[in-house]
Image (spheres, helix red, strand yellow):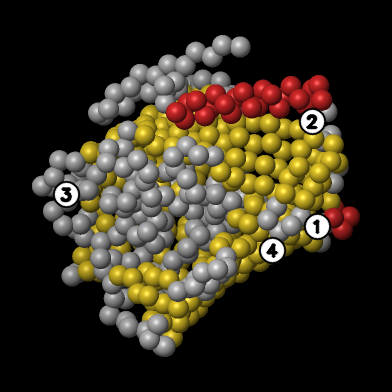
Amino acid sequence: MRVKITIFYRTTPPLYIGVFYACDIMAKNLLLFLAFCCIIRFMKKTLGFCFLVSVGLGVSAQGELSSLNIGLDYRLRGVAIDNNDTQADTNDSLNYYSQQARVYMTGWLNENVEASLRVQSLNIWGLEGSTSPVTRYPAADGSPWIENVYVNMPNLLNKHLKLVIGRQPITLGDGLLVSDDRLGFNAVRAQVSLPKKMDLDLFTAKISEGLGTTKGDVDLNAAVWALEQGDNRWELGWVREKDGGPNDYRLAKGTEPINSYSKNFYDLRLFGNLKDAYYKLEYIMQSGSAQQQNGETMDITGDAQRIELGAQSDTERFGRFGVKTVYASGSGDDPASTNKDEGFRSSFSKQWDGLQRDGMGTHYGATLSDAYNPSAPFSTQDTGLPLGASGIKTLGLGLFTVQKIIWTGTLDYYIFDSRTKNNGKNSLGTELDLGLNFRYTGYVTFALGASYFFPGDLYESANRVTRYSAETHVHF
């Protein structure tokens, strides 16, 4: 088998990307992945392939597979950002390529036990002045690491209980409170089917251990009750995140060292799936406390809400057209309060898609509490907001069209505001996003994007930021 790989490379915007860059070390890693998949397929056909999955909780599964699913997701992305720091008196740019490879194997040991393994590799190159950027992932230099390894038992208690044990993907709703961001959580999860179209989702996750260090454990627990009523789905959830510290705690006025903290989130969600339309409503209350190093207790309060509406229509002559609107807001922290944090913030909300922000606005990537940070574009070490700003209110409008099945065009516009004012100002800015996607086959897609971010008055002496991107996604 021969594989021909080409790329058209240019270091300044716009970026033109072919399929793969054969001389780069990560392209070699990709070829190794492909060879690995071919070997496994051969072993499966000729040797009756079996594999062993071990999870951190001491549970293992081994047996002859009755079926085996092997696949690869590969994404190559080029990004060029003009005036990355938003400042009018500078002429800076941020240009780089990033790639993400995810190899997975899923097999049924028998009709009641499934074992799964997913390995991921992230890499970035062309980033001047940095060979190892700070990210939330274990490695971003091309070294592979385990994203998921778990055992799934879906037929317990006469098929009323599904139990998943190991490092697994977990996302609740739209990820306002919990999302693993394709990193995986070490967790035990139980999903219970109840009468009258009700179900219960329970999990406990160990984020980090404090063994052998002065830091305590970080735990994440949740319980979600759901009810199906016709076209509507109601969800009532409780999520607790607990950090044994010591750690730096984020406030609007900066960070403050604390010994530990505990947060509780109470979530009410309604999702409606109508004919050619949908709506999502979500309201969250936050409560808790933090133990400060001076011995005092800091109360934690806050709330958040999100509303999204969308509809689409097919036309015989002009293809499919759709529209959506979204309003999202998380409460901000009053900088003047000393022993109270009113800012809504979930430490495990959906924030990243590989090395890119995953939020409202392709560039700004706003969540309910943080956004793109130009000084650390791949890190979660800061909120990305100006000092004194806290909580983000977003209003967005989006349009899309699908032409001849294979072409999709998108247009999105967002307005961002801080929930707390700083010297009477609260505008974070606006963003316009343009996107064009081409589905070459069911296995390969290409995408081009352009974003224009206009900083608000909270960013002093700021000018427009322009972001161009090109992307190739391969799945088999």
Which residue extends farthest front?
Answer: 212
Residue at 27% of width from left, 27% of height from top? 11
Q: Which residue is mark 3?
A: 87
| Label whose residue precedes the other's in the sequence (2 or 3) | 2
Displayed quadrant of residue 395: bottom left
Q: Which residue is mark 1?
A: 161
Amino acid type, residue under disc 2 in the picture: Phe
Q: How crowded is the residue under tag 2: few (<14 C-alpha within 10 Å), some, or many (20+)?
A: some
User: Circle 2 — which element?
Assistant: loop
User: Circle 3 — which element?
Assistant: loop
- Residue 152 picture location, percent across and down: 75, 49
User: Circle 4 — which element?
Assistant: strand
| Label whose residue precedes the other's in the sequence (2 or 1) | 2
Amino acid type, residue under disc 3 in the picture: Gln
Query: Which of the two discs, 2 and 4, sits closer to the camera?
Result: 2
Left or right of residue 76, residue 334 in this image: left
**So how many labels did they put on this image?**
4
- Residue 24 picture location, percent across and down: 42, 26
Residue at 35% of width from left, 18% of height from top? 8
Query: Which of the two discs, 2 and 3, sits closer to the camera?
Result: 2
How far apart, in angstroms, are the residues tagged by discs 2 and 1? 29 Å
How far apart, in angstroms, are the residues tagged by discs 3 and 4? 47 Å
In this view, 123 is above or below 287 = above
How far apart, in angstroms, are the residues tagged by discs 2 and 4? 34 Å
| Label whose residue precedes the other's in the sequence (2 or 4) | 2
How far apart, in angstroms, are the residues tagged by discs 2 and 3? 58 Å
Which residue extends farthest bottom?
Answer: 295
Q: How crowded is the residue under tag 4: few (<14 C-alpha within 10 Å), some, or many (20+)?
A: some
Q: Which residue is mark 2?
A: 49
Q: Which residue is mark 4?
A: 202
Q: How crowded is the residue under tag 3: few (<14 C-alpha within 10 Å), some, or many (20+)?
A: some
